[in-house]
Image: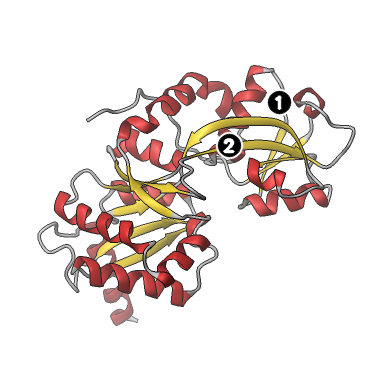
Amino acid sequence: MKKILILVFAFTFFACFRSEKNIGSKDNPIIIALSYPYAEKLSSSDLSYLESYLNSKTGFFVKLSIYRDSVSLIKDFGAGKTDAALVTVNEYLIARQDYKANPVLQIVRGKGEKKYFAGIAVADKNINSLDDLKGKKIAARDPYSISGFILPGMFFAKEKIKPQFIFTGSHEASVKKVFSKEADAAAVYEKMIKADKRLKLIQIMGPVPNEPFICRKKFNSDYCARISDALLSFSSDKKGAQILSLMADISRFEPVNADVYSDLHEIILYSGKDIYSLVPESYKLSKINEPYYFD
């Protein structure tokens, strides 16, 4: 029992007090966080392949860490427990606000799409507008989702409509809630709605810049660049391209700068009070409440 406690303490100590001097070594690997939407469809062999690829291309020891919870991801990033991360847009905006996260790459989908649209979908022929959703149930991935909650929250707040949000954990689960009649509508990606003839689009929202790959502010800039270069080349690898397609339909990455996300941050900041009022009180939520940080 005493030995187990010592091991737990040692791991906790390592996680809280990582040295910057030997990051990338076997004893202190570079930790890359993956927000759950980019890992949920990956097998253990897919994750191992990506790790091995990054190790080989960078010359560092790299470990991937999957986060189901946005709050934990952002806190660990801010505490230096992770060095880089592939995150949702809202996770990035909060990490930028609270910890000065640096976006270095952006997801590209399809044939070069760097932005996306969201939509509110219904299956009930009697629901044709936002006004018809007063007091109704809306299925959404989680309160950190731009497409599932933040954007629809803006529209509902503007129209003074207060629906009941049900957080499902994924866009696919949100759509299933509509078909099972557990929800009256789902807020998901527009392309998901267009791909299913059973769904009707009653509100389109966006565009939103695609998600970033970020490095923490104090992370060695050369190390960050080497990881970025490895990810940029991953789509040219046959197996790598297959893995990326499972990571929320990524085609490739391209370099990006922080300016790309500033307008969205300010819009959310302006509308935040009304948006966050739609979140059930049981949720402890990190919020956008400061102007966008520019380097």
Amino acid at the residue labelled 1: Lys
Residue 189 in sight here: no
Residue that appears at 18% across and 46% down: 218
Name which quarter of the figure residue 99 lies in: top left
Colour scheme in use: secondary structure
Pointer 2 residue: 117
Name which quarter of the figure residue 30 lies in: bottom left
Q: Secondary structure at mark 2?
A: strand
Q: Position of residue 13 (x, y in %)?
A: 23, 63
In this image, 231 relative to 124: left or right? left
Q: Position of residue 147 (x, y in %)?
A: 58, 38
The front one of 133 and 252 is 252
First along the sequence among labels 1 and 2: 2
Relative to 134, does residue 188 appear above or below in the rendering? below
Pointer 1 residue: 162
Can you say which quadrant of the picture contains the C terminus? top left
Residue that appears at 61% across and 40% down: 148
Relative to 215, does residue 36 appear above or below in the rendering? below
